[in-house]
Amino acid sequence: MREEKTRNTVHARRAVAYIVLAIISFLCLFWFYVLFINATRSNGELGRGFTAIPSTHLIENLKNLMTGTLPVLRGLLNSLIVASLTAFLCTYFSTMTAYSIHAYDYAGRKVIFTFILTIMMIPTQVTALGFVKLVQGLHLEDNFIPLIVPSIAAPVTFFYLKQYMDSNLPGELIEAARIDGAGELRIFNTVALPLMRPAIAVQAIFTFVSSWNNYFTPSLILHADKSKTLPILIAQLRAADWLKFDMGQVYAMIAFSIFPVIIVYLVLSKNIVGGVSAGAVKG
């Protein structure tokens, strides 16, 4: 009788969990549905209010977008270059930094770890003025280097990967590789990195999306149309004067801009659950 009662309680809790997850999933996906629906409607139709039925103006909106004055395809390429290189450099060097603190015992290690975590509390806006002056002094305006290189120092990514290493990268394995005669760089690239693949995939997704959606920093240093990223172009499209403003084009461009993000999620999504779970709880 007690076992049956316990079983019923477990089933009830599981049912409640599924219902809550279904509601949350619906709320998350509904706005994507609204976005794609609005991308198929004309500016006049959007002015009449929302409808759940797709319209027939998607091709027209995309055509007007591509033949307009904004370099949309160039902006897409710029965003891909910046986001891809940022995700690669950030995850690789953050993993290397986390590995140095995890695998080596040296004086000042705890101080360095605390210092890196302290940097996490400094907002980007606080350092923006000094960053812009530095970029101007180095004559790197309208250049992707100031957007890519600083991404190497990512305290949040470092902290997550450090926690993951504490759970999944035993020191005995590193010592065994050293006894076998492997060099330190080889141990990192052939032993540590493969074990860190789920966490690296998760952080690559987060870093790619963050860089892809970043408007603040690129807007400070990218001024020429040929070097602008998609978030800047979307802001320009929305800021057009009322004679040229077309909300259908705005929605079409936003929908167009999130397709690469969706592709990245689909490619790396199998690592999300395992990487987040293992990195969040220290074993």
Image (cartoon, rainbow, N blue to C red):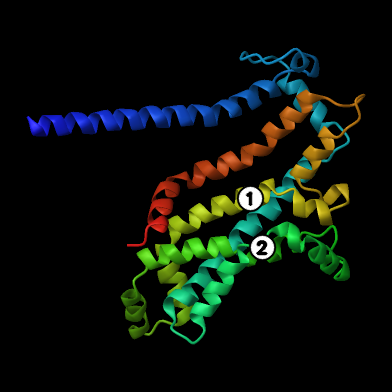
How far apart are the two marked residues, 2 and 1, measured between alpha carbons? 17 Å
Task: Decide if residue 176 is on the left or right side of residue 228.
Answer: left
User: The disc labelled 1 sits on which kind of residue?
Assistant: Ser
Q: Is residue 97 visible?
A: yes
Of residues 9 and 94, the one nearer the viewer is 9
Of residues 54 and 77, the one nearer the viewer is 54
Percent of width and height locating residue 33: 59, 25
Which residue is at 77% across, 47% downward? 229
Q: Are marks 2 and 1 in contact (CB under 8 Å)?
A: no
Percent of width and height locating residue 257: 69, 38
Which residue is at 83% across, 41% downward? 71
User: The disc labelled 2 sits on which kind of residue?
Assistant: Ile
Would you name the residue on which mark 2 appears?
A: 122
In the image, residue 91 sits, relative to residue 261, either above or below, namely: below
Q: How many other residues sit within 10 Å of disc 2, few (<14), some (14-19) or many (≥20)?
A: few
Checking the image for residue 177, the label placed there is none
Q: Earlier in the sequence, mark 2 or mark 1?
A: 2
Percent of width and height locating residue 209: 61, 48
Task: Decide if residue 118 is on the left or right side of residue 220.
Answer: left
Of residues 217 and 259, the one nearer the viewer is 217
Would you name the residue on which mark 1 appears?
A: 210
Residue farthest along the left direction in this orientation: 1
Which residue is at 41% across, 47% downward? 273
